[in-house]
Amino acid sequence: MQKSYKLENLCCAHCAANMEHAIKKISGVQSATVAFMTQKLILEAEEADFPAILEEVKKAIRKVEPDCHIIEP
């Protein structure tokens, strides 16, 4: 399952790269792209575990950039 999310308060490209790296390490994540210019996260993960994986993704984002958060559609 692939979903796209808007990120709010993503401050720099370096933080975006660090977030992407951290998210890709999460169990169940098949792919992840964090785009600084568009302030978007594209996440592909196992559908059955998606809610739990998304919570782990949110934690990883806050660890890298405490003021950044996901805006869910």
Image (spheres, rainbow, N blue to C red):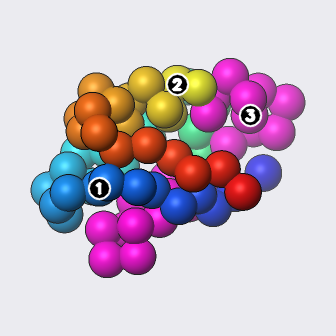
In the picture provided, is 55 more to the left or to the right than 51? left
Write down the region rendered in magenta: 31-54
Of the image marks 1 and 2, the number of the one nearer the N terminus: 1
State the separation of the CA atoms marked 3 and 2.
10 Å
When the figure is inspected, residue 57 is found, relative to residue 35, above or below; the finding is above
Q: Nearer the viewer, residue 23 or 63?
A: 63
When the figure is inspected, residue 12 is found, relative to residue 70, above or below; the finding is below
The residue that mark 2 highlights is 56
The residue that mark 3 highlights is 50
Give the label on residue 40, or none.
Answer: none
Of the image marks 3 and 1, the number of the one nearer the N terminus: 1
Q: Nearer the viewer, residue 63 or 30?
A: 63
Give, as a three-letter code, the residue at label 1.
Answer: Leu
Looking at the image, which residue is at 40% across and 67% down? 39
- Give the image quarter of residue 7: bottom left
Q: Position of residue 57 (x, y in %)?
A: 50, 33
State the separation of the CA atoms marked 3 and 1.
23 Å
SS under mark 3: helix
Which quadrant of the rendered structure holds the C terminus?
A: bottom right
SS under mark 2: helix
In the picture provided, is 6 more to the left or to the right than 54? left
Look at the image and tell me whether residue 65 can be seen.
yes
